[in-house]
Image (spheres, rainbow, N blue to C red):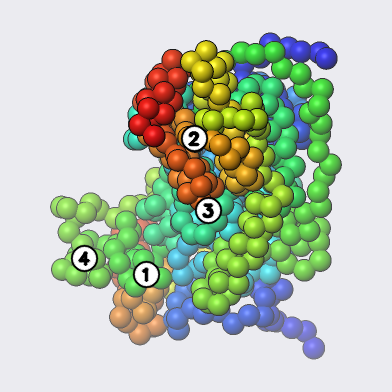
């Protein structure tokens, strides 16, 4: 294993280039600036294009054009910037084009702050732009997992022709960890017979459009997208479980928060509480399957988030009322500590 | 027998949806003829914008990409960066280009993006029913300035060609009209020059076309053309604002 010490953002950019990404359009916003800066330094060395756009809106529309022309393309931003990109993401999803979008979440709403947060859960799992669409969202918990999920995001995005998002946070983007790129490979070129590249290069005329004024044709399009979403839900959900055998408390957490929760589990043990963890790796599709693994004797399922409670909605849907649920969260860029979480578990157990 | 006038291969056979007397039909034909004459149709990607001309993706006989409102120059930028040897053009109205999309058009010009923009200025928002545009003339009545545009509260009309021509990356900027046969010939000449400018890699090129909208002006087609000539041309002077150094 040949490991290098790298910052999360830079490792993600490097993994994208290794994966075969050759077009990057972006606009600076903290805490993800190392991604466009890395792309500016490195993309030209592989014959690719880095372009700093005039806005997040322009960046995502450059992605839209580049993907429609057959390019393997990525953009990155952070929460308010992702909000601006939502119009374009809706178009890309409707036109069924592949791309990767990195969101290094910061605290909000509004301009908010630049510290890590998970308050974009709704934005990255519910669409955020207009209409019936989804994007695949991956939530890495380490720099190593970030690079693996970038590689996977390009592959899955192209397989299903759907935008894929890396839903990290400021902590994942900014921290340095050892990372091994040996498992990251350039992806095979998927044929793109639908790309608008000029009629000399394919039979007929290719048109990339999202306008369907006839209600029945638009409904057919929505039904087709739904079938694709259903397939992705059955095939692409990813999760990790930890210490679940005989757990009387199951904590649900993703990304940075899941690492803190793992440290909490041994602390809870010393309080006589046997706790396990479900860690969604895909936020959409939400890994409902993982919740069938909760032991029947479980007293409490608690969603732990760096938000005021967003994933808890999906947790409760997955639980279907079979277990008592609770929520614990910190917001505004405040990162929960293991002792915060231990206290929350114990106080919840006391009132059950 | 020699043909002196025939259907251009640059247009599909689909009948257009445009209102009688609307200039889009004329300008579509000029753009299509230009692409055909320059031998570019097979390696062109056009970008349709939001507004009446959104369906231009069904009429131009080349690959097309429909863009969100105002964003056509950004979409075209993405296309051109992936396909630098193709011809890429945007076809945008004044609501699209001069209002919601001002940032995108200014910065595409600013980067010297090697694309061509066909900018249709008819002094109102046509598709949504004739509301005020940034290009609406002072005291011109529209559905959102029913008493006439008041420059005191809504500003004077935006002269886009003059504005874009101040940008270094803009290689070719010309304003034309299509209100008479001679004006149509001049418009064709400008469109050809704009595409040549792109092929030669000179930078961003734009042709602004003063156009008639009889439906929303509530005028007969011939009266709408006269309205363009008598009311728009004095405020929006025709002519070339920028050409590449050393010729076209």
The chain holding disc 2 is A
Dot 1 and dot 2 residues touching (CB under 8 Å): no
Residue closer to the observer: A96 or A339? A339
The image's mark for residue A90 is 3
Q: Is residue A47 above or below residue A94?
A: above
The answer to whether tags 1 and 2 share a subunit is: no
From the image, state whether disc 1 or disc 3 is nearer to you: 3
Dot 3, how many residues are within 10 Å of its Cα: few (below 14), some (14-19), or many (20+)?
many
Q: Residue at x 15, y 52 (%)?
A: B152
Query: Of tags 2 and 3, which is closer to the observer?
Result: 2
Q: Are marks 2 and 4 on the same chain?
A: no
Q: In which quadrant will I find the N terminus of chain A?
A: top right
Residue A229, position in %: x, y? Answer: 63, 56
Residue occupied by mark 1: B128
* Residue A299 - label: 2
Tell me where residue A283 appears, x and y as whole percent. 57, 41
| For residue A31, above or below residue B169 | above
For the residues labelled 2 and 4, the Cα–Cα distance comes to 65 Å
| Quadrant in the picture for the C terminus of chain A | top left
Residue for point 69% across, 13% down? A178
Disc on the earlier residue, 1 or 4: 1
Q: Secondary structure at mark 4?
A: loop
Answer left or right for B146 relative to A83: left
């Amino acid at each position: 294993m040949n490991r290098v010490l790298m910052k999360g953002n830079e490792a993600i950019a490097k993994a994208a280039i290794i994966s075969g990404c050759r077009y990057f359009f972006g606009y600076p916003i903290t805490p993800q600036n190392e991604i466009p800066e890395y792309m500016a330094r490195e993309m030209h060395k592989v014959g690719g294009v880095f372009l700093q756009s005039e806005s997040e809106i322009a960046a995502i529309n450059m992605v839209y054009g580049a993907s429609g022309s057959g390019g393997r393309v990525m953009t990155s931003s952070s929460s308010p910037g992702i909000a601006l990109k939502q119009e374009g993401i809706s178009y890309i999803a409707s036109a069924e084009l592949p791309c990767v979008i990195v969101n290094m979440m910061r605290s909000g709403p509004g301009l908010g702050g630049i510290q890590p947060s998970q308050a974009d859960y709704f934005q990255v799992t519910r669409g955020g732009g207009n209409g019936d669409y989804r994007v695949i969202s991956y939530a890495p918990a380490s720099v190593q997992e970030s690079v693996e999920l970038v590689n996977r995001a390009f592959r899955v995005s192209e397989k299903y022709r759907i935008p894929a998002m890396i839903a990290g946070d400021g902590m994942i983007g900014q921290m340095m960890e050892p990372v091994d790129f040996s498992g990251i490979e350039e992806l095979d070129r998927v044929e793109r017979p639908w790309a608008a590249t000029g009629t000399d290069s394919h039979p007929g005329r290719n048109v990339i459009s999202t306008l369907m004024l006839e209600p029945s044709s638009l409904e057919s399009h929505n039904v087709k997208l739904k079938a694709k979403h259903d397939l992705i839900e059955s095939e692409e959900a990813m999760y990790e479980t930890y210490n679940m055998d005989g757990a009387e408390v199951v904590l649900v957490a993703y990304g940075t928060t899941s690492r803190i929760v793992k440290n909490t589990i041994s602390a809870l043990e010393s309080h006589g509480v046997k706790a396990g963890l479900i860690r969604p790796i895909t936020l959409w599709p939400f890994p409902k399957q993982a919740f069938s693994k909760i032991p029947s004797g479980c007293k409490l399922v608690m969603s732990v988030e760096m938000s005021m409670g967003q994933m808890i909605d999906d947790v409760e849907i997955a639980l279907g009322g079979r277990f008592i649920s609770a929520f614990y969260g910190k917001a505004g860029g405040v990162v929960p500590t293991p002792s915060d979480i231990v206290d929350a578990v114990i106080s919840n157990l006391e009132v059950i | 027998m020699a043909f002196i006038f025939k259907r251009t291969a640059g247009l599909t056979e689909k009948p257009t949806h445009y209102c009688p007397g609307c200039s889009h039909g004329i300008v579509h034909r000029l753009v299509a003829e230009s692409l055909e004459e320059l031998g570019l149709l097979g390696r062109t990607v056009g970008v349709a914008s939001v507004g009446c001309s959104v369906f231009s993706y069904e009429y131009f006989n080349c690959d097309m990409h429909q863009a969100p409102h105002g964003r056509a120059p950004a979409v075209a930028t993405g296309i051109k960066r992936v396909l630098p040897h193709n011809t890429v053009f945007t076809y945008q109205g004044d609501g699209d280009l001069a209002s919601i999309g001002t940032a995108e058009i200014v910065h595409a010009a600013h980067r010297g993006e090697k694309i061509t923009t066909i900018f249709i200025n008819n002094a109102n928002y046509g598709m949504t029913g004739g509301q005020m545009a940034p290009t609406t003339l002072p005291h011109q009545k529209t559905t959102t300035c029913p008493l006439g545009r008041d420059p005191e509260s809504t500003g004077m009309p935006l002269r886009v060609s003059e504005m874009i021509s101040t940008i270094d990356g803009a290689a070719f900027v010309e304003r034309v009209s299509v209100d008479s046969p001679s004006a149509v010939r001049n418009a064709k000449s400008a469109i050809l020059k704009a595409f040549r400018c792109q092929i030669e890699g000179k930078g961003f090129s734009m042709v602004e076309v003063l156009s008639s909208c009889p439906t929303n002006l509530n005028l007969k087609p011939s009266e709408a053309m006269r309205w363009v000539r008598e009311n728009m041309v004095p405020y929006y002077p025709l002519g070339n604002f920028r050409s590449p150094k050393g010729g076209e």
